[in-house]
Amino acid sequence: MEISLQQVEHRYQRGTPFERLAIQNVTIEIPSGSFIAIIGHTGSGKSTVLQHLNALLLPSKGEVKIGDRLITANKKEKNLKSIRQKVGIVFQFPEHQLFEETVEKDICFGPMNFGVSEAVAKERAQAAIHQVGLDETILQRSPFDLSGGQMRRVAIAGVLAMEPDVIVLDEPTAGLDPRGRKEIMDMFYRLHQERALSTVVVTHSMEDAARYADRIFVMHKGEVYRQGTPEEIFSSPEGLIELGLDVPEVIRFQQKFEQRLGIKLAKPYLTMEELTEAITSYYQGGNLL
């Protein structure tokens, strides 16, 4: 399912003394089946954009198209529940939202809230628990007896059980160590490919944006500062550094290598495996300059 934001502006507490402009002139296209990353500093507008993707927030100006549903500014919208069934959001630290007495009941809550029968919800719970890499024996346990990593996977399974067409991830690896971060992101990327999901990740991790995304949007002071493929975004990392953003470690390593040898490799390499192969080829006389 496609989502597009066209010239979207959002103001919090509009019409009050506390009115605050959060985003403006935001145009973002999310094609069906794509993997999009939205990056930027805290306060840059990332989370505000995220909440427009399933109509948790409505635009103050502009329009948002979610599938065949058009949402415009200053128009009262009805039946937004159907949108939220199609666009699932995994918020930061989703394990904090677990509340049922068993894992199975927690996963079933979302589908049943959207009208799915208990029997079908239980079938979805079994499928979803496998999709997040857990065994179905965990379904009858209390979610509060699980490890932090297991709890996060259970919370994610609850979103997957609603069978969304689009999944939106808000800092999905927050608080995880490097190994846990890679496991979670690899899981999302596998699900993205297997289920042909449109996937949007809001992240501070430049490594994750570079490795997984088809296209990156850089938010700055409430606007889209820059957009492009990972290669385009990281081909001139100086601009990101000026904004105070980090760049992937592999890009920093490539810069230092090029500066030390006084050369320029053919393109920015986004994984250490690709860069290692390029450097090896260079020393073997390959044409990379």
Image (spheres, grey):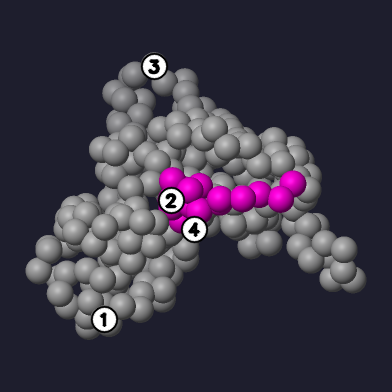
| Residue to which mark 4 is pinned | 170
Q: Nearest the camera: 223 or 59?
A: 59
Residue 172 left/right relative to 48: left
> With respect to residue 216, does 220 lie above or below?
below
Q: Are marks 2 and 3 in contact (CB under 8 Å)?
A: no
Query: Which residue is rendered at x = 64% and y = 62% of the image?
Result: 42
Q: Which residues are magenta?
A: 75-89
Q: Nearest the camera: 269 or 117?
A: 117
Q: Are marks 1 and 3 in contact (CB under 8 Å)?
A: no
How packed mark 1 is, by other alpha carbons closer than 10 Å (few <14, some 14-19, many 20 or more), is: few
Residue 161 in view of the camera? yes
| Residue to which mark 1 is pinned | 101
Q: Nearest the camera: 193 or 205?
A: 193
Q: Earlier in the sequence, mark 4 or mark 2?
A: 2
Quadrant in which residue 282 is drawn: top left
The image shows residue 135 at horizontal and vertical percentages of: 12, 63
How packed mark 3 is, by other alpha carbons closer than 10 Å (few <14, some 14-19, many 20 or more), is: few
> With respect to residue 16, does 258 lie above or below?
above
| Residue to which mark 2 is pinned | 85
> With respect to residue 286, does 140 lie above or below?
below
Query: Which residue is rendered at x = 78% and y = 57% of the image?
Result: 11
Mark nearest the camera among 4 and 3 is 4
- Give the secondary structure at mark 2: helix
Q: Earlier in the sequence, mark 2 or mark 3?
A: 2
Q: Earlier in the sequence, mark 4 or mark 3?
A: 4
Residue 57 left/right relative to 22: left
The residues bearing labels 2 and 3 have C-alpha atoms spaced at a distance of 51 Å
The residues bearing labels 4 and 3 have C-alpha atoms spaced at a distance of 41 Å
Residue 87 counted in the magenta span:
yes
Mark nearest the camera among 2 and 3 is 2
Residue 287: which numbered mark, if any?
3
How packed mark 2 is, by other alpha carbons closer than 10 Å (few <14, some 14-19, many 20 or more), is: many
